[in-house]
Image (cartoon, rainbow, N blue to C red):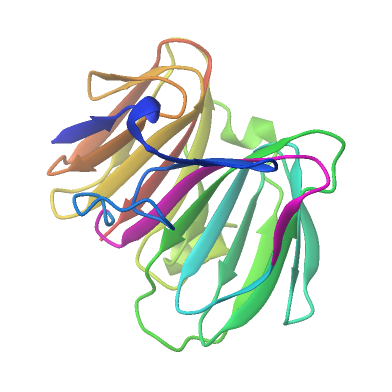
Amino acid sequence: MIDIRPREGLGAFANDWLDSRFHFSFAEYHDRARMGWGKLRVWNDDRIRAGTGFDTHPHRDMEIITYVRSGAITHTDSMGNRGRTAEGDVQVMSAGTGVMHAEHNLEDGDTTLFQIWILPDARGHAPAWATRRFPGEEKSGRLVVLASGREAERAAGALPINQDAAVLGATLRARETVRHRLGATRHGYLVPAAGTVTVNGAALGTGDGAAIADEDEIVVTATTDAEIVLVDVP
């Protein structure tokens, strides 16, 4: 089963510094049919104006993955971490027992990003933060695991999260195909960050979401040059 969720039909918020689309219920947007997808709770598509951002605020008991589509985001937190995550790269914050953090666009132009929240496997983990560069050539023509709770994938370079889940990314040229073994008992959610693709034959444009379940394998074919992000969760 693949449920296509066009970007134009997503929840939306805009003010003078932030333009967001919500794939699932978030903030003032509430849809009882879209409270999450398996252990995936939030997928926000944000555009943040230059010189602005999210001031210090709290989180707890959530795995928060940020995939930067363009520009860069600068993170600071109550653990003493500070770091800049740029286009195509990823940061992970495990909120655990509680953390205060801020994220600002200190660049000269807009920053666009996906912020993805995954429910942890247990409450009360120690909070943590990490970021990693993922050069474009590393994701070219193949799915790369960006963040994972699986030991082997973390050992191979994926950022750690506290859940049996994975966040994957790929850049594809038109007509290139990648495959991902999902399994009938798991949930997948895929969004093109750029370009257009088909997912098991269903067409998606930039920013559209595909909620996937009861599919043993996901087959993604680019119909134009494309960049995709995929989440695989229980």
Residue lying at 46% horizontally and 72% vertically, measured from the top left: 62
The verdict on residue 199 being magenta is no
> Quick one: 214 or 194, which is closer to the camera?
194
- Residue 70 position, x and y percent, is 69, 34
In the displayed structure image, the side of residue 62 where residue 98 appears, left or right: right
Does residue 198 show up?
yes
Q: Which of 172 and 17 is in front in this view?
A: 17
Comparing 172 with 60, the one in front is 60
Counting labels gives 0
Residue 131: x %, y % from top left:
69, 59
Quarter of the image for residue 5 reads: top left
Regarding residue 88, the answer to whether it shows in the image is: no
In the rendered image of this protein, does residue 170 appear above or below residue 172? below
Instruction: Using residue 195 as the reference point, say whether residue 86 is left or right of it.
Output: right
Locate residue 125, reporting x and y percent. 48, 86
The answer to whether residue 210 is above or below residue 97 is above
- What's drawn in magenta, residue-wise? 37-55
Side of 234 relative to 67 (left or right): left
Vertically, is 45 above or below 131?
above
Residue drawn at 51 percent across, 82 percent down: 96
In this rendering, the answer to whether 226 lies above or below 156 is above
Identify the residue at image location x=27%, y=56%: 35
Instruction: Reply yes or no: does residue 48 show up in magenta.
Output: yes
Residue 216: % across, % down: 17, 41
